[in-house]
Image (cartoon, rainbow, N blue to C red):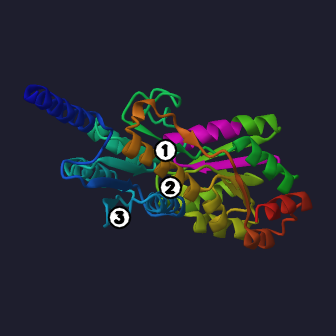
Amino acid sequence: MKKQTVMKFLAVILLGLSVVWTSPSVRGNDGVLRIGILQLADHGALDEAREGFINRLAEQGYVDGQNIQIQFLNAQSDQSNLQVMSQRLVADQSDLILGIATPAVQALANETTEIPILGTPLTSFVTANLVESDERPNTNVTGTSNLAPIDQQLELLTQLVPSMRTLGFIFNAAEDNASLQVEIAEEEARKLGLETIRMTVANTNDIPQAMRALVAQVDAVYIPTDNTLVQSMSIVGQIAKETLTPVMAASTGATLEGGLATLGVDHYLIGRMTADMAIDIIENGARPQTMPIQRQSETTLVINEEMVEALGIVIPQSIRDRANSQN
């Protein structure tokens, strides 16, 4: 009888241990959940994505300084900083890392194939060589895409600037995702019967001269979600006002800083979506390898009224009604 009791007791212990061993968790050995965040630079879209991520975690009970530790590092657009900071987050044994912007995620992926990495807001994880496919990443990287509905954006631009015949693009060709968006936009522009001109920059210092050269040749300008350009949208906007050139930016935040209008994604909401993916990893043991890349299904129509007035653009009532219906 005693032997049976001992055997039952041992069975219960072994069952409990098996639960501990197999329970999905990314927590460190001390039970503290460490989340690293590496951000490329300071600018609206990236800041909004980070805020959405942290706020959503807090709403779900994961509060920095209480039951989790968040280590936030900002590379200030310096590639050497990205490498050093990625190494630091890995060495500090982060349980999960968020990379904000493509170069940040690429730097992280170069340092670890074990720690789960979430990326946001990226245009294409495939183009950035971070995953095998959107449906099944098959790497330790997954996350959320901010690819805008470029066809709808250019259709909107033709309604706002019906006299447009030539469309210009300004972007940093070193950003693979910016180049991808321009390729898509050029194809869509051709469908609309527009001629296109490209102008590339290497850094923010190139933007004023390149922008002035571009607006002298085109009727309007399209700017993709390019980190170099987004950081300088106030400069772009000032030149647009001086030359009376309509500018459409792919993101809503960039539009409010220097664009005319856009039909774009909300980076704060994208950050929240990314947090939900993090929670799935934390609570359910989900693996990035099998987590599809997520996209925001709804878009937001944004009109920069200051730019509308400065350029003397007449917004069709149907477009204003659509914008008002969102409020």
Label 1 and label 2: CA atoms lie apart by 9 Å
Up-down relation of residue 180 to residue 33 (above or below): above
Q: Earlier in the sequence, mark 1 or mark 2?
A: 1
Amino acid found under the numbered disc labelled 3:
Asp
Pointer 2 residue: 228
Q: Residue at x 62, y 58 (%)?
A: 211
User: Is residue 166 within the magenta segment?
Assistant: yes
Tag 3's secondary structure? loop
Pointer 3 residue: 64
Q: Quadrant of the N terminus?
A: top left
User: Is residue 216 within the magenta segment?
Assistant: no
Which of discs 3 and 1 lies nearer the camera? The answer is: 3
Q: Earlier in the sequence, mark 3 or mark 1?
A: 3
- Check contact, mark 3 vs mark 1: CB within 8 A: no
Where is residue 210? Give x, y as percent.
58, 56
Amino acid found under the numbered disc labelled 2:
Thr
The magenta region covers: 165-186
